[in-house]
Image (tube, rainbow, N blue to C red):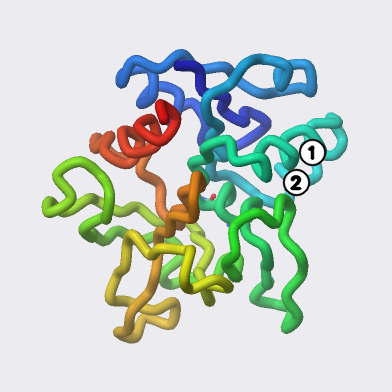
């Protein structure tokens, strides 16, 4: 199985190592010709979504990648990747939401919603659909996006929820979703020793 990993910027190498350990072949996607490869799935890693979005366009990768995503190629998107995938993105500083980069996942996200105090934090949750889903999964958040709302509550399935909201108060906070062939996570599973999110992703790529 061959997985393309967007490797323009950010935390891509950790995804690569984790997927290789699980037996997948990884191709780093750095330029438009890399997208000519036969791919069974794509990882959109964390990093800086504005920089990644700009580079995607400058390098002429945006249109082809968008086409593949909308055609249903399995996607694992973490943190900045989730921002790129979301239909709508709002910035903490601006009140109006804007259309997201790939605009493929029917959720609204807010960038850098956790502010300075909670900019980076850890938690744990049970994640629906991973192997041994009754066992807690460690969650690492780094200047994470907040999933403000699901735009399609029938088809977008929340798979991970924590009990803390961006302002630090208690409340139900969806931090992971699945929508057909797309997995969007606000946290960084590649920065843990637990490969079960990646296993779930690879099982989608097999199908
Ligand atoms: N804050 C970053 C952004 O807005 C995302 C952070 C991350 O990917 N760890 O793109």
| Foreground disc of the pair 1, 2 | 1
The answer to whether residue 71 is left or right of residue 169 is right
- Can you see residue 145? yes
Residue 14 at x, y percent in the picture: 42, 29
For mark 1, what is the residue? 62
| Labels in figure, total | 2
The answer to whether residue 97 is left or right of residue 121 is right
- Disc 2 residue crowd, few under 14, some 14–19, many 20+, Cα 10 Å: many
- Can you see residue 191? no
Q: Is residue 1 above or below residue 127?
A: above
Determine the residue positioned at 64% across, 34% down: 9
Residue 6 at x, y percent in the picture: 62, 31
Image quadrant in which the C terminus is located: top left
Asked whether the beta carbons under mark 1 and mark 2 sit within 8 Å of each other, the answer is yes
**Which of the numbered marks, if any, corresponds to residue 53?**
2
Determine the residue positioned at 51% across, 47% down: 182
Q: Quadrant of ligand 1?
A: bottom right
Secondary structure beneath dot 2 equals helix
Determine the residue positioned at 76% across, 80% down: 96
How many angstroms separate mark 1 from mark 2 (CA)? 8 Å
**Which of the numbered marks, if any, corresponds to residue 169?**
none
Q: Where, by quadrant of the figure, is residue 186 drawn?
A: bottom left
């Amino acid at each position: 199985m061959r997985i393309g990993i967007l490797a323009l910027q950010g935390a891509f190498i950790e995804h690569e190592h984790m997927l290789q350990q699980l037996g997948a072949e990884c191709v780093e996607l750095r330029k438009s010709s890399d997208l000519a490869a036969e791919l069974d799935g794509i990882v959109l890693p964390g990093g800086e979504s504005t920089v990644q979005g700009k580079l995607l366009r400058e390098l002429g990768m945006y249109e082809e990648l968008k086409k593949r995503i909308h055609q249903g190629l399995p996607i694992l998107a973490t943190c900045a990747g989730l921002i790129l995938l979301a239909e709508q993105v709002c910035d903490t500083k601006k009140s109006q939401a804007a259309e997201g980069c790939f605009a493929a996942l029917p959720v609204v996200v807010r960038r850098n919603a956790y502010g300075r105090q909670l900019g980076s934090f850890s938690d744990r949750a049970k994640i629906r659909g991973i192997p041994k889903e009754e066992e807690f999964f460690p969650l690492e958040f780094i200047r994470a996006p907040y999933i403000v709302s699901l735009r399609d509550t029938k088809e977008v399935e929340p798979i991970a929820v924590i009990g803390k909201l961006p302002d630090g108060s208690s409340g139900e906070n969806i931090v992971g979703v699945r929508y057909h062939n797309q997995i969007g996570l606000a946290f960084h599973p590649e920065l843990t020793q637990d490969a079960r999110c990646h296993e779930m992703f690879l099982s989608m790529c097999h199908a």
